[in-house]
Amino acid sequence: MSGIWLVAMTWSISVCYLMGYDRSATDLKLVLGFPDWVFWGIVVPWITCTVVSCVFGAIYVRDGNLGVDLEDTDDLGLGG
Amino acid sequence: MGDVLPSVRAVATVFAQTTAPPPNVGMGAMVMLVLFIAGSIWIGVTANRVTRKGGFMKGFFLGNRGLGVWALALTATIQSGGTFMGFPSLVYSHGWIVALWIGSYMVVPITGFGILGKRLAQLSRRTGAITVPDLFRNRFNSPALGLTCTVFILLYLSFLMFAQFKAGAIVLQMAWPSGGELTLSEEVVSVSAQRYHIGLIIFTVTVVSYTLLGGFLAAVWTDLFQSLLMFVGVTILLAASLYAAGGLEQATLTSLANTGPGFVSGPGYIANGADHQFLPLSLAVSFFIIWVWGGVGAPAGLVRLMASQDTRVIRKSIYLLSLYNMGIYLPLIIICICGRALIPDLDATKQSDQIIPRLAIMTTSGWPGGSFVAGLILAAPFGAVLATVSSYLVVLSSAVVRDIYQRLLNPAADRAQLRRAAHLTMIAAGMISVLVSWYPVDYLQVFIIFSTSGAAATFLVPAIMACYWRRATETGIFASMLSGALTVLILYVIGIFELLPLQPIGAVAKFRPYFLCGLDPLIWGVLASTGSGVVVSWLSKPPDEELVALMFDATTGEAVGSRQ
């Protein structure tokens, strides 16, 4: 899961920096109304990460026993 | 401190200093907000009935560990007044680059829930922990560690809370009807200040009342309610804003014409051509780390994971929250770009926090029943702030009641005494917040970032060590917490008092840190926390084997807490 974060960070920052920083307004290209660096650097990876999160969560996060919850934990053992 | 607490007249002048006149609103907006307030009180009353079952502490502060998918997924985030005031303000002020600034939210659910969710829920059951300080106290069998956690939680959550109170008051201020019997004054300069103060009081009474009634469940249910409302509100505002602006392409071009090239490129737009960079590369990296790991380590998020029903809930929450985040943050960015196109003249340092309420009122003003629709949209940020403050009140109160009152002052406290202590804590917190927020602070988001950074640097590494590292010791956790907290604090002190020359980067505000090597203080805090936690744990006496076995190998539900 940290790997997903690392890949997302590397992609988004690289694309946004290389395509979007210190860019002249005359160079501006829009994709569906978004500046192209926002579309490829943020919108597309966001959609991708959402899909990956769903798939990864379904496969990797297994159901497991969380343990038995106590009846009453007002207990410092002393009252309450 | 003189310029941090301006005179009342200066505050009123602040509200009047705008080239954009206050919008006219009908009664509908206020009616919707009143309905929302009434709904929140009703939730509080209902939650009160549920929490009366079983023990007071587990019911009032942890909802009897009954959080289902929707409650966990849509309330474990750190959406708040920052989401609807601070963040939109930044988009309005600095442009498309803020999409990168917030971009790591794309991986918040999978990282946070995936790494800590299951293990934290398991550990809290084994230790019988109700609160985050409880968790650390019982995991390491250390009352001192629990108390240290309590102190840190009080510190950070107080800052976070103060920032939210301003946001709530602003929404009510904006929704106040113009003219008629509710007109407060003929003097324009003082009207806005009066509305703000009245809004602040109404907001405080509302949130303290329903939280006091229903505790953790009230906080979670209102959070869930407002999350759903927020989604509806953002969707309506997205459509309305795009329609008014003539589409996203036109909005981008118009906002560019209203500002300058920096609005559509990195490192972002700065008004008046100042020699300042909003998001240089170093800060871009910092914030991609902060929102993920800050969220993972946030006490209010940790306690929700502790309250989840089972692992199925945690797993499904990853899906739900991923979809939800995408449906909130990307639309908000688009809305604010439209906002800069439609309302170009808000003063970037004084009025930009109001972009969402102003847009809501403006884009619906020509609709039949438009003010009611505006009220629905305004209810979303209002609800976010209410829910956030409510959550913080619960965490604050639990820390005070459990770790100070019950453990130190009155161990034999009965149910009535515990309930009274919880109520008094919440009321005191509300009153202090009103006093602090009476003079509104600039740049709400900066307070939120300070507290987020501080809390993450304090709790993130210790939480991961407690969950996964058998060799972690009490002393190592202490060192980890203290070094993380001190690092962030020192860097903010250097910045606020300008002990070193400040770099011209980041949000433009009085309250800002020193960015060592251009990185946010959280990065240095986490590094310090990790290094000291690991080194000191290795150097200190190994933990008790029996306790470690109970935490990592036990299959029964015997709680360490019950042994005390």
Image: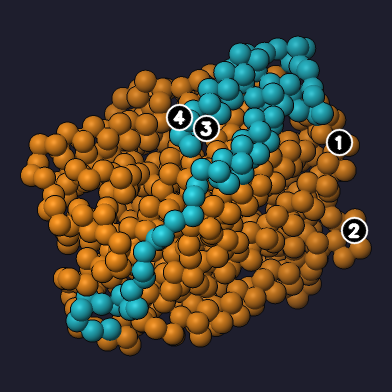
Chain colours: A cyan, B orange
Mark 3 — residue?
A4
- B169 and B520: which is toward the camera: B520
**What's the residue type where badge 4 is placed?**
Ser
* Pointer 3 chain: A
Residue B93 in view: no
Residue topped by disc 1: B247
Q: Earlier in the sequence, mark 1 or mark 4?
A: 1
**In the structure shown, which secondary structural element does the residue marked by tag 3 occupy?**
helix
Identify the residue at horizontal 25%, vertical 77% (top origin). Answer: A75
Numbered disc 1: secondary structure: loop
Pointer 2 and pointer 1 on the same chain:
yes
Badge 4: residue crowd in 10 Å (few <14, some 14–19, many ≥20): many
Which numbered mark, 1 or 3, is in the foreground of this view? 3
Residue type at the position of mark 2: Trp
* Residue type pointed to by label 3: Ile
Instruction: Give how far across and how far down residue B202 sits, in percent.
Output: 57, 71
- In the image, is residue B259 above or below residue B302? above
Residue under numbered circle 4: B286
- Where residue B350 appears, as percent x and y from the top left, is 59, 43
Q: Chain of mark 1?
A: B
- For discs 4 and 3, the disc positioned in front in the rendered view: 3
Q: Earlier in the sequence, mark 2 or mark 1?
A: 1
- Tell me the mark number nearer the camera, choosing from 2 and 1: 1
Is residue B544 visible to the viewer in this orientation of the structure?
yes
Q: Is residue A49 above or below residue B151?
A: above
Q: Are marks 4 and 2 on the same chain?
A: yes
The residue pinned by badge 2 equals B367
